[in-house]
Structures are given as structure tokens and as C-alpha cells.
Image: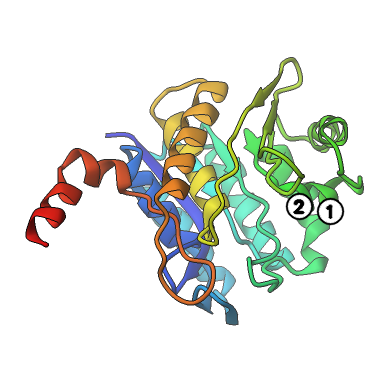
């Protein structure tokens, strides 16, 4: 069985971070492993507090996995501090996994900064050159490039700038623009627009984590970059379409909808009612 490792923060509400990544790995058919970089106390409405893990335990988690279990792909999420960025970067340079998917997590849905401002330069200098693909949304891409992104033409320019920072490819997510949420994939040679359909729901907690980990899972299974991105886009679209109205804020996506449907779970529930 193929494997994928997530290096990210823990979400006590279960909708994003490590929890979303492991669900996404499982739903996409790979065995998931995890390195926790920070523990967040959060729910669908807010992040109440964040506790960074100590650097030695982050390093030990990474080494414990790589020294024993084959790692077919790595997904990187919340890194929080420049020190965490450096520790993770050193480990990845040592072990050189075949694929690294970087989700440059910066701000939570509720507005809490998950990446400290002083860590942005470290992320750009250390992590982007290691990334097989980086998956920023519009606000994240603006921070990384300094470009105000208001149009699809701006998205093209920003994607080129992200590659200039060292990433091998980029998926710039267009959901923050007006109109349909079209994403731009660019690998330095080919630009490919991945069309989307806007789904009107408040339950979008963890969508970025879920998408990037789905890309990592599909890369682990041997799909090309573009195929992995397209399959992940299909997966997150279904997960959002059937999102869960849990809590009083931004509810989570439904990672396992397709599996539940295939197993006849929903039909069984209707019969019981």
C-alpha cells in the first residue's frame, strides 16, 4: 500500500489540519502518517489558542517515520514559526521524499494567524525550493509574491512568481475571486485552468488541507502532477457538495461521502428512519 506523511498542526475540531489530512489520505486510498507541528484549540468558529510543539519532538517524529516506513509523498501544512520551518526543511533535505506538496497555511477561516509573519521569509527561502507543488489560495499567493490578485491575468503573473521562488509547480486556487472558482496549474511549461463550480455553503473548514493532502495521495499512487491535481479537485468538490453542518461556524467537508454512498450507508439510514 502506498503511503503519505502529513507534517502539520492538529485541529481539535477535526475539520482541518492533521485530522483532515489523514481522512483525505484514507479516502484517496493511501496509508497516512503524521508529524504534529502544533496543537490548536479550535472549533468551527474560532482558534482559541495555539501551542507549538518543541523542535526536538518535531524532528524525532519525522525521523521515526522515515527511518522505518517508506514515505511515497509528503504534505506540509501549518509550520507556525521560522524555527519549525528550518527543522522540517533540514529533515526533508536529508530524506528527500519523492514528492512534497506544500500548502502554505497562513490564516484560519476565523482570521487567526497560523503562520507568524516572521516565518514567511523562512517559508519562501526554505520550503518553496523543496516543493514539488505549492497550493496557495489568493491571499496566500499575494503574501508570497507581493502581487494584488484581482483577475485571472493576475493569477498567471502570481503563478510565474511562485515558480521564480523555487517551487517546481503551483496550483493557485481561485476561489477568492468573483465568479466560478477556477484554479490555475502551472509547472513552468504548461498552464492549465481547472474549472470549478461555486458551491454555496458555509461549510468549508479544512478545504485547503483536504485538497493538498488529496494531491499528495494521488502523487503517492503514481499519477502525474496534473492528473493528481485534477483528481484531488474532483474529490474536494464532492466533499464540499456534501459538507457537514456541524457546529455554529464553518462546518467541515465530508471526506468519506463517496465511500459511504458506495457502501449504501445513506440508503440504510433512510430505511431505518
Secondary structure under the numbered disc 2 in the rendered image: helix
**Residue 62 in the figure: left or right of residue 26:** right
Q: Quadrant of residue 259?
A: top left
State the residue at coordinates (23%, 47%). 260
Evaluate if marks 1 and 2 touch, with contact meaning CB atoms under 8 Å apart.
yes
In the rendering, which numbered label is found on residue 143?
1
Using residue 7 as the reference point, say whether residue 105 is left or right of it: right
Q: Secondary structure at mark 1?
A: helix
Residue 226 visible to the viewer: yes
Q: Is residue 169 visible?
A: no
| Residue 4 at x, y percent in the picture | 41, 43
Residue at the extreme bottom: 48
Which residue is found at the position 62% from the left and 49% from the top? 103
Q: Nearer the viewer, residue 75 or 62?
A: 75
The numbered mark at residue 4 is none
Q: Is residue 88 above or below residue 174?
A: below
In this rendering, the count of numbered labels is 2
Circle 1 packing at 10 Å, graded few (<14), some (14-19), many (20+), is some
| Residue 106 falls in image quadrant | bottom right
Q: Nearer the viewer, residue 267 or 161?
A: 267
Q: Is residue 127 depicted above or below 60 in this figure?
A: above
In the shown orientation, is residue 74 left or right of residue 267? right
Residue 254: where, in percent of width, then height?
38, 53
- Name the image quarter holding the C terminus: bottom left
For label 2, the crowd category at 10 Å Cα-Cα, with few meaning under 14, some 14 to 19 and many 20 or more, is some
Residue that mark 2 sits on = 140
Question: Residue at horizontal 47%, vertical 33%?
Answer: 234
CA distance separating discs 1 and 2: 5 Å
The image position of residue 34, as x and y in percent, is 42, 57
Amino acid at each position: 500500500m502506498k503511503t503519505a506523511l502529513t507534517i502539520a498542526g492538529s485541529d481539535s475540531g477535526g475539520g482541518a489540519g492533521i485530522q483532515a489530512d489523514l481522512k483525505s489520505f484514507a479516502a484517496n486510498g493511501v496509508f497516512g502518517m503524521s508529524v504534529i507541528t502544533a496543537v490548536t484549540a479550535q472549533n468551527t468558529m474560532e482558534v482559541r489558542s495555539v501551542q507549538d510543539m518543541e523542535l526536538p519532538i518535531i524532528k524525532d517524529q519525522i525521523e521515526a517515520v522515515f527511518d522505518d516506513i517508506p514515505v511515497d509523498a509528503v504534505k506540509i501544512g501549518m509550520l507556525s514559526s521560522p524555527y519549525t520551518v528550518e527543522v522540517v526543511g533540514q529533515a526533508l533535505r536529508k530524506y528527500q521524499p519523492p514528492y512534497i506538496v506544500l500548502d502554505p497555511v497562513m490564516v484560519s477561516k476565523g482570521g487567526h494567524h497560523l503562520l507568524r509573519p516572521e516565518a514567511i521569509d523562512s517559508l519562501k527561502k526554505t520550503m518553496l525550493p523543496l516543493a514539488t507543488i505549492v497550493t496557495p489560495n489568493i491571499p496566500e499567493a499575494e503574501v508570497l509574491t507581493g502581487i494584488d490578485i484581482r483577475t485571472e491575468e493576475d493569477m498567471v503573473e502570481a503563478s510565474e512568481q511562485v515558480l521564480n521562488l523555487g517551487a517546481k509547480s503551483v496550483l493557485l486556487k481561485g476561489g477568492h475571486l468573483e465568479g466560478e472558482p477556477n484554479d490555475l496549474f502551472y509547472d513552468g511549461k504548461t498552464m492549465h485552468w481547472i474549472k470549478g463550480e461555486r458551491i454555496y455553503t458555509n461549510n468549508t473548514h479544512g478545504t485547503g488541507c483536504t485538497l493538498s493532502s488529496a494531491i499528495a495521495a494521488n502523487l503517492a499512487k503514481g499519477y502525474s502532477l496534473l492528473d493528481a491535481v485534477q483528481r484531488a479537485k474532483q474529490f474536494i468538490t464532492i466533499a464540499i457538495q456534501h459538507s457537514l453542518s456541524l457546529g455554529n461556524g464553518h462546518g467541515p467537508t465530508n471526506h468519506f461521502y463517496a465511500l459511504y454512498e458506495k457502501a449504501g450507508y445513506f440508503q440504510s439510514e433512510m430505511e431505518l428512519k
